[in-house]
């Protein structure tokens, strides 16, 4: 009896779940994404001038037309599409794309189109092919498929009920009512096995959308490492490219540098003797204030010690005594000179001696009362100097530094002396480039390096400050062969390698590891890693590198 029960139970396990586990037309495995990373049907074509991408969206043909070399959108073109139904023209550009009504794209199949783009510079013919797949999210097909599923599920439920009835009748006939417990157990097992399968097959998929229904073009990094980016996104992010050209360039070396003032347009204001500072009538000049040569910036009053005051008072008393004696002598000589008793010369000598004594007396008083005036040696602005009234300064103390901001130099340090006139550029932390003119190099080493002076050309010194650090790129006589590329085209990968993005197709960008050398303040020299004639991204490379 137990053996018969085991046979029946095994039959239930084999027969009932088998047809319910899967049926025709249902594959529950996850479908892989298309290779191109896009759900929308599209085609592309290019020439030496233009690059065109056509995307099917809601029974419209959306056309993106860009310059092939720069990836810059073409906004003033006239588009004409040659279809099987005849030519269709559009002259209006909506947003970043040209849109053509195309109801014939609702039918699946292969469409060979010829697009003619006409601009002021001429016309270009661009052939392309569109492939519309079948059953690409048609709601009617989805609803019909869902109805067939429900009919199949109903048949399965009826079959399961009939199998349970036959099984129960068989058990009652073999063992009678005393085996009712065994029969109940078998029915319970049958319900447990059939229930989950029927419940799964009985799901109503009518309210769900097909996984192929969305028509989204999402930027993503493909398995081969390249980046797919829809043309619309490229226009939003302003992705720009340039075609690489090989050439001969002078080798450039990088030198650390800093901004210094032009020695002929700068100066220091120092005190010749120690003393106490006092402001001029207009007050001390502020930092950044414009001053002219000869302007009084401060006064220094020399302090007098007690012994100095005693000596000065003694000298003042001696001078006062001598002045009194000479004044009386002059008074006696005047009537004698008028009567002819003495010569006129003696009277004049006495008067000169008296005037000299009075001048010495006035000068001695002035030493005690008149401070030293500190004047500006050159015209410019106050670059440094924080002073206060009553501040004590020592001799040769720098009170103010005056710099002409329009005349600045750059001092670079090199481990080898550069020859005479060399072209050079400087680049600051923000990427700003400055043209430099060689002025001279030092003969004595400074910390095992040679100082080299450059003058900033033109009026590009605005915005710089004295002491600011920069990178000087000085050219040498050695020539190198490579590709000149803007510095903005370089990105740094996770492993520290320099990478540029090659514009492989209209919507695909491939990262290329490259080896570079400095060229000037705005460009680098790509020595290896990519060939000439390739399109590389010069604007927006950092944004492409963030796509995952």
Image: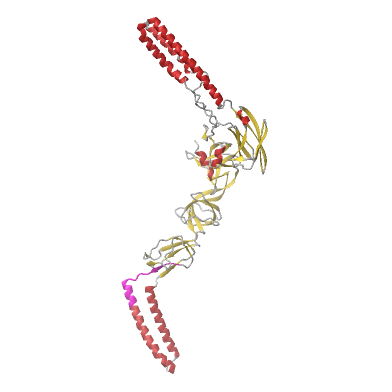
At which x and y percent is residue 88? 66, 35
Q: Please state which of residues 196 and 370 is positioned toward the viewer in this rendering.
A: 196
Where are the magenta residues, as a range? Answer: 296-313
- The magenta stretch spans residue 471: no
In this rendering, position of residue 90 left or right of residue 293: right
In this rendering, position of residue 103 left or right of residue 382: right
Q: Residue at x 46, y 67 (%)?
A: 295
Q: In this rendering, is residue 450 above or below 267?
A: above
Q: In this rendering, is residue 264 above or below 33?
A: below
Q: In this rendering, is residue 89 above or below 341?
A: above
Q: Please state which of residues 394 and 240 is positioned toward the viewer in this rendering.
A: 240
- The magenta stretch spans residue 299: yes
At which x and y percent is residue 429? 48, 49
Q: Residue at x 46, y 15 (%)?
A: 157
Residue 2 quadrant = top left
Q: In this rendering, is residue 166 above or below 401?
A: above
């Amino acid at each position: 009896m137990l053996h018969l029960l085991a046979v029946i139970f095994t039959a239930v396990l084999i027969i009932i779940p088998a047809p319910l586990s899967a049926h025709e037309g249902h594959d529950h495995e996850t479908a892989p994404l298309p290779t191109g990373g896009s759900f929308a049907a599209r085609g592309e074509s290019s020439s030496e001038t233009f690059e065109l991408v056509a995307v099917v969206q809601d029974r419209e043909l959306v056309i993106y037309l860009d310059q092939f070399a720069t990836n810059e959108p073409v906004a003033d073109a006239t588009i004409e599409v040659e279809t099987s139904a005849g030519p269709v023209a559009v002259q209006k550009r909506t947003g970043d794309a040209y849109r053509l009504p195309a109801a014939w794209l609702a039918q699946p199949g292969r469409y060979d189109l010829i697009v003619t783009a006409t601009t002021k510079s001429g016309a270009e013919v661009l052939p392309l092919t569109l492939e519309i797949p079948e059953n690409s999210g048609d709601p009617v097909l989805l609803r019909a498929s869902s109805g067939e599923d429900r009919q199949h599920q109903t048949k399965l439920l009826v079959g399961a009920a009939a199998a349970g009835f036959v099984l129960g009748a068989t058990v009652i006939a073999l063992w009678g009512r005393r085996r009712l417990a065994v029969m109940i157990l078998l029915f319970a097992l049958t319900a447990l096995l059939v229930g989950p399968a029927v419940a799964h097959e009985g799901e109503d998929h009518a309210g769900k959308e097909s996984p192929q229904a969305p028509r989204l073009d999402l930027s993503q990094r493909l398995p081969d490492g390249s980046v797919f980016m829809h043309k619309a996104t490229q226009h939003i992010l302003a992705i720009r490219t340039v075609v690489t050209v090989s050439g001969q360039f002078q080798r450039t070396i990088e030198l650390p540098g800093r901004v210094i003032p032009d020695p002929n347009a700068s100066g220091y204001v120092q005190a010749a003797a120690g003393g106490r500072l006092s402001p001029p009538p207009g007050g001390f000049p502020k930092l950044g204030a414009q001053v002219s040569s000869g302007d009084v910036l401060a006064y220094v009053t020399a302090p007098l010690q007690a012994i100095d005051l005693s000596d000065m008072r003694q000298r003042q008393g001696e001078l006062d005594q001598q002045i009194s004696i000479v004044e009386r002598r002059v008074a006696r000589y005047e009537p004698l000179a008028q009567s002819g008793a003495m010569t006129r010369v003696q009277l004049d000598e006495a008067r000169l001696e008296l005037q000299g004594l009075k001048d010495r007396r006035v000068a001695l008083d002035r030493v005690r009362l008149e401070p030293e005036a500190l004047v500006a040696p050159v015209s410019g602005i106050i670059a440094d100097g924080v002073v206060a009234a009553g501040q004590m300064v020592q001799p040769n103390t720098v009170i103010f530094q005056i710099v002409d901001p329009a005349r600045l130099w750059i001092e670079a340090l090199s481990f080898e002396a550069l020859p005479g006139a060399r072209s050079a550029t400087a680049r600051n932390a923000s990427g700003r480039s400055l043209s430099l003119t060689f002025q001279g190099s030092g003969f004595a080493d400074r910390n095992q390096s040679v100082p080299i002076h450059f003058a900033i050309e033109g009026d590009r010194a605005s915005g710089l400050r004295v002491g600011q650090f920069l990178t000087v790129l000085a050219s040498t006589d050695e020539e190198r062969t490579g590709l000149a590329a803007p510095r903005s085209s370089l990105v740094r990968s996770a492993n520290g390698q320099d990478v540029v993005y090659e514009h492989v197709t209209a919507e695909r960008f491939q990262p290329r590891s490259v080896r570079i050398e400095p060229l000037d303040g705005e460009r680098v020299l790509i020595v290896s890693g990519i060939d000439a004639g390739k399109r590389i991204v010069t604007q927006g490379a950092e944004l492409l590198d963030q796509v995952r």
